[in-house]
Image (cartoon, grey):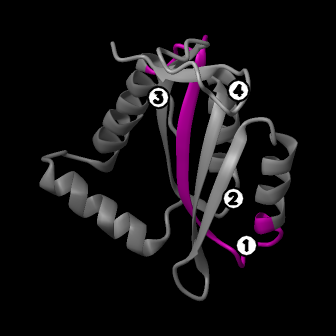
Amino acid sequence: MQRVTISLDESLAEAFDQLATEQGYGSRSEAVRDLVRKAIATRREAAASDGDCVANLSYVYNHHVRTLAQRLTELSHQHHDLVVATIHIHLDHEHCLESVMLKGRTDQVRSLADAIRAERGVRFGELNLIAVAPNGDHGPAADHRHGKHEHLTPELE
């Protein structure tokens, strides 16, 4: 067994201890191991990286963290082909909520979401991903005024 040391601020450590107690864990280590197992299983289940998707990445960040807002903007610009839109909400004097709508290859969308969530100062990052299939079928309505392009149909299975 390997020993891993993590640092938590006091309020987060207290909240984690309370959660671990409420869920009946005998120690922090047992609770952390369970969280790690769950994260690995969730990632493995969602690991299908082929195909296309539409997604929403939402996260909270502290805009006072040195150059974080600039780094986040640069990441979005580097992946302008994936980023469809961004909604930015000021929560208080320090924190912002951003919700980024993404569209593209699933592996690329996940990679960008991981890079954003890994930035120091980003908190509570969640990716909601929906697999889609390119669909050129315009159905019975032959009178489309928006030109020829593919639609993205959600995979309902």
Question: Which numbered disc flags the more N-terminal residue, 1 or 3?
Answer: 1
Looking at marks 1 and 4 on the same chain, the residue that comes earlier in the sequence is marked by 1
Q: Residue furthest front?
A: 143
Q: Amino acid at mark 3?
A: Ile
Question: Of circles 1 and 4, which is in front?
Answer: 4
The x and y percentages for residue 155 are 42, 16
In this orientation, which residue lies closer to the viewer: 149 or 153?
Answer: 149
Please tell me in which quadrant of the rendered image residue 156 appears: top left
Residue receiving disc 3: 130
Residue 106 or 66: which is nearer the viewer?
Answer: 106
- Report how far apart the C-alphas of labels 3 and 4 lie in the structure: 14 Å
What residue did someone put label 2 on? 120
The Cα atoms of the two marked residues, 2 and 1, are separated by 8 Å
Marks 2,1: beta carbons within 8 A: yes
Question: Is label 1 in contact with label 3 (beta carbons under 8 Å)?
Answer: no
Which numbered disc, 1 or 3, marks the residue closer to the eye?
3
* Label 3 crowd (10 A; few <14 / some 14-19 / many >=20): some
Task: Check contact, mark 2 vs mark 3: CB within 8 A.
Answer: no
